[in-house]
Image: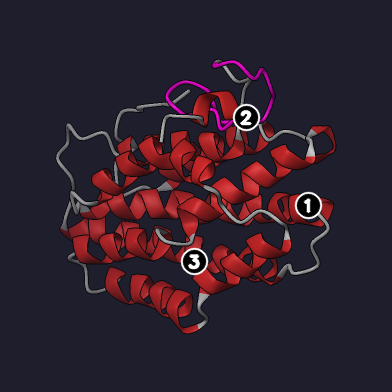
Amino acid sequence: MTTSPVAPELHNLAPIKRQIDSEIDSLVAALPDPKDLTPEQRRGIIARYSAVLEGNFIYWMTAAYLSVRSEEARPILIDNLRKEIADCHPEMLRRFAVAAHAYPAEADAMAVRDGLTKVRTFLGRLQGVQNVLTMGFFESYIQRFMSYLADLAVAQGSTDLEYTDVHGVCDIAHSEGLLKALSAEAAINPPDPAADLFEGVNKLRALIQTINGNGRCERSCGLSGCPGTRDAICPSREHVKGRY
């Protein structure tokens, strides 16, 4: 389920923060219990997350940076990018996935393809306030999701938790910083009053749901935790065979 609330007054970010928290609470509440998942379902969540984040987070944050006009917002975004690149977070994530025996396969990449394309295309419009809001939502979600992701990896036999340890801490400061950037950007580059401020959040939320495998497969495998719901592709052999 997605939401499209009426845009709140941007001089007061409290309603936006409440909406972000509500969306994240809903996503976290819908996470399947790791104890109820099979090893393949745990692997799938880690693999789909890795397929999205390793090659796209820096792209997303760069799009946010390119879209803003505020001199106060830019250093906040650059600081985030600098940490991602200087500490080589994509390689950190790759090691995490490999250690959990969850390196993405073709089916994992195809499962998230449609949702990922929608997020990329939205951020590519370079709308300052909406892009910063979308990334602020994601950073806030990640700090809540990291402990769950670590639990999945441990259940898979992994001991390499550097990625989840680092992001469970640094994303607290990043999410707070992005809210400050949002306020600064809105002051000098307000969006169209008719714009849906949460359009990007909704698209990213849908992608997160696909990563997490929420719901039951509507294609044929019937597995809870399979991403084959709505427009996503079930990676079971009968769906993949002969299609790609």
**32 or 39: nearer the viewer:** 39
Are the two marked residues, 3 and 1, in contact with CB atoms closer than 8 angstroms? no
The amino acid type found where label 2 is placed reads: Cys
Q: Nearer the viewer, mark 2 or mark 3?
A: 2
Residue under label 1: 151
Residue 85 in percent (x, y) is at: 43, 78
Q: Main secondary structure of the magenta part?
A: loop
Horizontal arrangement in the rendering, residue 102 relative to residue 159 (left or right): left
Work out how far the residue at label 2 is from the one at label 1, CA to CA, in angstroms: 18 Å
Q: Secondary structure at mark 1?
A: helix
The amino acid type found where label 1 is placed reads: Asp
Residue under label 3: 174
Work out how far the residue at label 3 is from the one at label 1, CA to CA, in angstroms: 23 Å
Q: Secondary structure at mark 2?
A: loop
Are the two marked residues, 2 and 1, in contact with CB atoms closer than 8 angstroms? no
* Residue depicted at x 46% and y 49%: 137
Q: Nearer the viewer, mark 2 or mark 1?
A: 2
* Residue placed furthest toward the bottom: 86
Residue 174 can be seen in this image = yes
Residue under label 2: 226
The quarter holding residue 157 reads: bottom right
**How many other residues sit within 10 Å of disc 3, few (<14), some (14-19) or many (≥20)?**
many
Residue 27 in percent (x, y) is at: 59, 35
